[in-house]
Amino acid sequence: MMAWLQLWTMGLVATVALSISFAAAEDPALPVVEELGPSEIVKKESHPILFRQKRDWIWNSMYVEEEKPAPSPYKIGRLKSSQTMTVKNFQLEGEGANTIFTVDSKGDLFVTRALDREEKSTYHLTASMYDGNNNLIEDAGDFEIHVTDINDNTPVFPGAYNRSIMERSMIGTKVMEVKADDADDPSTANGEVRYSLIHSHSAFEIDSITGEIRCKTNTLDRETKSQYVVVVKAQDMRGMASGSTATTSVTITIADTNDNLVSFTRRTYDLRVPEDHKVNEKIGTLELEDRDQIQNKEPIFIIPSDIKMFDIELSPHKDGKLMLKKALDFETTNSYTFAIQVRENLRFPAENMNSAITTAQVNIKVLDVDEPPVFTQHVYTFTVVEESIVNNIGTVTAKDPDRANKRIRYSILDKDSPISINPFTGQLSTLRRLDRELEATHVFQVMAQEEPSGLESFVKVNITVQDINDNKPELVVDDIFLCENDVTNTVIGTLRATDKDDQPASFSFSLASESSNFSIKDYGNNTADIIVRSGPFSLDDPKDYSVYVRITDGGRPIQTSITKLAIKSCRCDNRRIATQCKAGARRMGVSVHALIAILLCILTILVIVILFVMRKRYQKNSLASMKNSGEIHEQLVTYDEEGGGEMDTNGYDVSILSSACHDGSLLRHPDHHPHPSLYAMVQKPPHQSQPTACKGDMAVMIEMKKDEADHDRDGFPYDTLHIYGYEGPESLAGSLSSLDSSSTGSNLDYDFLSDWGPRFRTLAELYGVDEQEYYHQY
């Protein structure tokens, strides 16, 4: 109907325009514009004039129904012009020209295929008209072809919806808004969508035009039903039965609010707790029940005001944690009974008000535990006067908290503590005199151990050493010197004093001995000046100046010290600034403790030196003994061969015959006196010019050795007996052996061997022993 109305309106406008043009052509009163060619216009006017050319196209807007099948091109309109020509030719340009849209020689416009409005709803074209000679009759004119809509699209929802609404919401509360899209023309009924719920719902409703879903009840209860699924239908053609439809589901979740009262799960809670349970720790849980979600649980516990031992805290699951606030004692109270209430701040009236258990009774039974001893105080503090032995400083006391009241034994953990404790009574006493100046406070721990269980407890003990006046005052001086030009009553320095004692001291200064040169002026404020009594002085005077200063501290008992104060001599300028001083050191008094420390250091050094010297001497004697008493290996070898000269020593051990052992360790007489070796007993004759070898002497010596070995039980037996005759007969130098030497006829002097050094010491002792040294102990 709308399409025909538009077509009729366009035809009416075209008819009126055509009538006006004909009237202008026939009426002679109307001005007539002479048609001139372009060249003629140029001739008549020196300047070109632009004229608006009147269009002579006569047509209406054209419309094409979408999705109309076109097995063959069908006519949708005609291109008309006021120009009347027998032969005409039309040309199209623009969107779809000569493909979708064609025109014949009569100006009829055809469509060659079906069109889709949702793909393209309007086509813009341009038409031109030519005569038979292909001359332009009518300029190009623009026109449009509109594609009319049909209901060929179905409404489409973007997807399923999920929303939530608070339980017990008011009527009319908006839940959400749904929207379906329809590709048809929204200005027509084809694109107008209406909404409805497929199944009528008692809890929700929907606006048919806007698609807004609202709550139509105020009784939504999450605990009864926590979720609703609503099916929404969208239909175009304004909801007419002929319209296309689409559906979607809307899931509505009911959000929780605190509308249920919390309740105890039991009316009575029985708990058992040991008496040594730690304070501020949980002793039990009071379970609660609440139909609301955990984030909406807000239980409030009420405990009787006279119950100070326990308290209630919320657990992560919003249950009640029963906490211990004070230590339990089975011997004092072995059970507790009290009532606990619970309530909750509700936003709406609770439906379970009558069924909720809001008061519960708690019964707590305390279990007995063998506990360690308990001291009567957390920290013990005592005072001891220094430099005194105290047998009773104080008493540390611990008790067994159990009914058994077991015996307790005390001990001090610090083994180096100067304080001792009676293991049965806990009485403290001093082991030695305490010195406040060395250590003013003694801190240690006392252990109380229960017998026979061995349970232990510890306590801290502080012993404060009380000060007495037992330290002598010490002199404190600045740089004191005298100048050559110092006259009488010149102050050369100021004296002060210190005292290690804690007691306030009132020092007084005086000279311990009369001095002709100096005096002391005591001001009574713990300071004094040294004043020149007679001057001036000379730097060339070899005399050293010093005074003995006596200081008393004014305490009880009074302590006095005398200190020698050395005063150096200087040459000074006019302002009494020393420019040159004679060398000299100031000597101060040394305390008794420092003197004892110095003596101990000296004594320690002396002991170390003595031990070092003794060790050196012992090592020297050991080395000498090792050198003088060489190890002797004696073997008994029997052979019938004659001596092979010097080569014979390579095959047999002749160390026994050439040994320098002379310390008497191997040869002992029955009287146990040490004797020199037999070689040392062989004496060289005093006057003989040439040594001669004698077999008889050797035989006698061997017989003597055998006899001594047979009768000497203390000596080591000889394992080897060597018998030699002459050796080295082929040697040009002759034999150096003593085997051929005569013990009576030799007159050689071997004392020069002593001058050859330590390597020949043994040989010198062997051949250099005189007869009177026979019994000399080496």
Image (cartoon, rainbow, N blue to C red):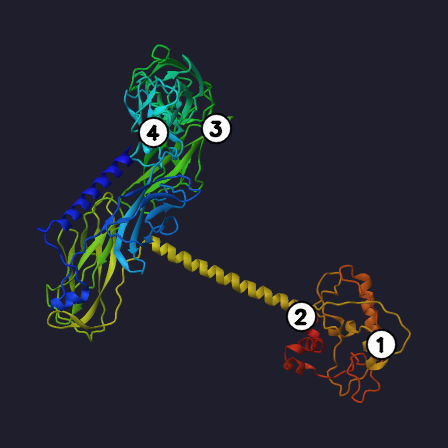
- The answer to whether 617 is drawn above or below residue 175 in the figure is below
Front disc: 4 or 2: 4
Mark 1 surroundings within 10 Å by alpha-carbon count, few (fewer than 14), some (14 through 19), many (20 or more): some
Q: Amino acid at mark 2?
A: Lys
Lower sequence index among marks 1 and 3: 3
Mark 2 surroundings within 10 Å by alpha-carbon count, few (fewer than 14), some (14 through 19), many (20 or more): few
On residue 237, the disc is: 4
Q: Left of 278 or right of it: where is 257?
A: left
Q: Give the CA distance from mark 1 to mark 4.
A: 155 Å
Q: Give the CA distance from mark 4 to mark 2.
A: 138 Å
**Residue wearing tag 3:** 455
Q: Are marks 1 and 4 in contact (CB under 8 Å)?
A: no
Q: Residue furthest right?
A: 640
| Residue 757 visible (yes or no) | yes
Between 325 and 226, which is closer to the camera in this rendering?
226
| Residue 759 at x, y percent in the picture | 66, 77
Mark 3 surroundings within 10 Å by alpha-carbon count, few (fewer than 14), some (14 through 19), many (20 or more): some
**Residue wearing tag 2:** 627
**Residue wearing tag 1:** 724
Q: Give the CA distance from mark 1 to mark 2.
A: 27 Å
- The answer to whether 124 is drawn above or below residue 350 in the figure is below
Q: Amino acid at mark 4?
A: Met
On residue 610, the disc is: none
